[in-house]
Amino acid sequence: MLYEEGFTQNREISWLRYNERVLEEALDDKVPLFERLRFIAIFVSNLEEFFKVRVGSLLGEDDEGDDQPDERSGMTPAEQLRLIHSMVPGLLMKKDMAYGIVEGKLAESGIIRMEPYQLDENDRGRCFDFFRDEIKSRLKVILLTSDDPLPELDEERPYMIASLDAELEDRFGVIDIPEDIPKLLVLDRGIKPGSAFRYVLTEDIIEMFADTLFIPFIPTEIFSIDIARNAEAAGGGSRANTAGEMREIVRQRKTAPADKLIADGRMSGNLRRYLEGCLDIDSRQIFSTTRIDFSYLDELAEAVPEWLRIGLMYEAHDPYDQTREIRGNIIDAVKERDFLSAYPQDSMDLFLGLLREAAFSARVKEIRLTIYRLAANPKITEYLIYAARNGKKVRVVLELRARFDEERNLEWAEKLRAAGCKVYYGTENYKIHSKMCQIVITGADGEERHITQISTGNYNEKTAKQYTDLSLITYDRKIGKAAARLFRDICKDRIADVQTRGSRKASAKRYAPLLASPVSMRSELLRLIKREAGKGDRGRIFFKVNSVSDEEIIEALMEASCAGCQIRMIVRGICCILPGIPDCTENICIVNMVGRFLEHSRVYVFGEGAEEVMYISSADLMTRNLDRRVEIACPVCDGKIKSRIRGIMTEVYCDTDKGRVMMPDGTYARKV
């Protein structure tokens, strides 16, 4: 097993260390104060998803009696759970410390969150009026005895729970808080320079006047709570790819078993035992912290006056619009040369402009697109609908199994189909995670030609402003034909047949020069790693990915390192290979980057100079990406574009401010 060789670490522990890196940004004095608060919110959100997915999966394995050790650490599911549960309280304490520091500095800067005990009589009166007039009637209050089951709690909703003073028996109360109520009450708007902006959070106001909700009982303790439900138990690994099946999975997720409860304080024994019994969890799965819900941040940011925001938030980022470089239409420009957009330095306007042109151009016969995640009100779907109404054939492969975006994708599938688009729900055996678009035009010779766009990230206009991703638009005929074949095979659910039909080499050729999972990406990446290993100390490998956990890839990288190949990797999150282990990975250096923008692009570079081979990809080095999803890696051939991508990677790799170096024990250290 890999762990016996001492150069790998557990996937879940690696992820927790990454989330701790996110929390470090909240403690960095160079980060604007309000943004530090946002990093705390990101840490909390990340941890929530970690419990839903990864901890949920481990709990399922443990419940089934699975004691198979993890290949990368030698730990059984039970041992991994014990370690996770021992690490999380310390991370929450660090988060609480960061929250206290940031709130104190914000108060010094003039943005003051008032605690109930700090309010004078006038402020308390304003809070009561707000509670009575805007909040109380919208709250749903449920009284319970110790024998009553806990009502069904939606993990997406905020709740409060209280112990009640009752003489004869234990009584508890649940407050169901609507998502759309105001998150805060502004006491002083700080309009004039030098004045303070004071506010109270709605959940603190509810707690202040909770005694009016439980009459004749008096609450003796009250807490905001958050429950994480096991997403894996609700079809997380399902092959469902019909609308009906996916709606059922979404419904089941709302009542799936709980795998974590977190409260903003320490509960008494009675309340704790009641919740443990109702949720069928043990004491290790209940955590305490000082603040759970950070959904108030957007409302707070809007309410703070402009003069106070200066210096407390990042300056507005203005992405470059590449359409400024184009004279005439985008379609003709793309036929002349390849275009690379590097988000968020570049805007998505080039791709959106191309799609808009295609929707109205008489030359365009068909538009094809794979969708994994979309923004709330995307222009992309608007242009697809225009195209369908203009008589063009529009084929959309919409992956219903994009975790936690299933309902939104179902809604868009219905809208697109109603507009005349042909919508496919992917394949039975594989998630469609590739990001590709094709615009089909008729060439001068009457043959079909393709403008192909391939991206490392989703077609989401919001995240294109927040994530670093790469988008390549090309008129290359080989890439166009390969992508067209892949589209047809996806729509006909023939990927599994291609993978098993004939030799591996013949299957790989079907999509060449693209690398496509699950058909050819693994084998080609391994071949290229071995190619560089064969060069000894002249070998060069440079990767930028989100995660590295696949055992076969890890072993190949270790062998390349042992052969003298110099391996550099930028890994944002999970990284199961440990660098710098003598006689194993001493030629591997791994850098982690957490900053203003989420590092999301994936790039694979092998060799240098005339032998350099570069791919941009939707896939990480994880088994699920290489074997259980349809992914693409697209070769980059244009010299200027290769140089730009290499420059982006080098800048991240050499960053001494936000970059960290992974140490041989899996921890991160500042660059010297």
Image (cartoon, rainbow, N blue to C red):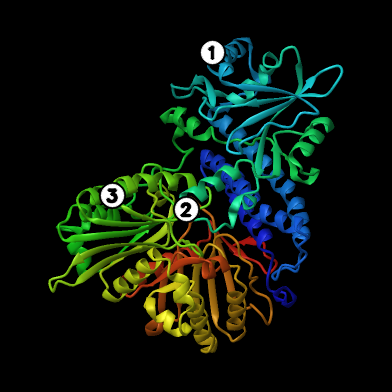
User: In the figure, 654 relative to 274: above or below?
Assistant: below
Tag 1: amino acid? Asp
Residue 222: quadrant of the picture: top right
Label 3: which secondary element: loop
Direction front: furthest residue:
244
Most foreground residue, 235 or 15:
235
Q: Does any portion of residue 24 appear in the rendered image?
A: no
Residue position for label 2: 242
Residue 562: quadrant of the picture: bottom right
Residue position for label 1: 133
How far apart are the alpha carbons under marks 3 and 1?
Answer: 47 Å
Direction right: furthest residue:
168
Tag 2: amino acid? Thr
- Callout 2: 10 Å neighbours few (<14), some, many (20+)? some
Left or right relative to 119: residue 492? left
Most foreground residue, 418 or 371:
418
Residue position for label 3: 420
Q: Nearer the viewer, mark 2 or mark 1?
A: 2
How far apart are the alpha carbons under marks 2 and 3?
Answer: 19 Å
Decide which of tag 3 and tag 1 comes sooner along the chain.
1
- The reply to whether dot 2 and dot 3 touch (C-beta < 8 Å) is no
Q: Nearer the viewer, mark 3 or mark 1?
A: 3
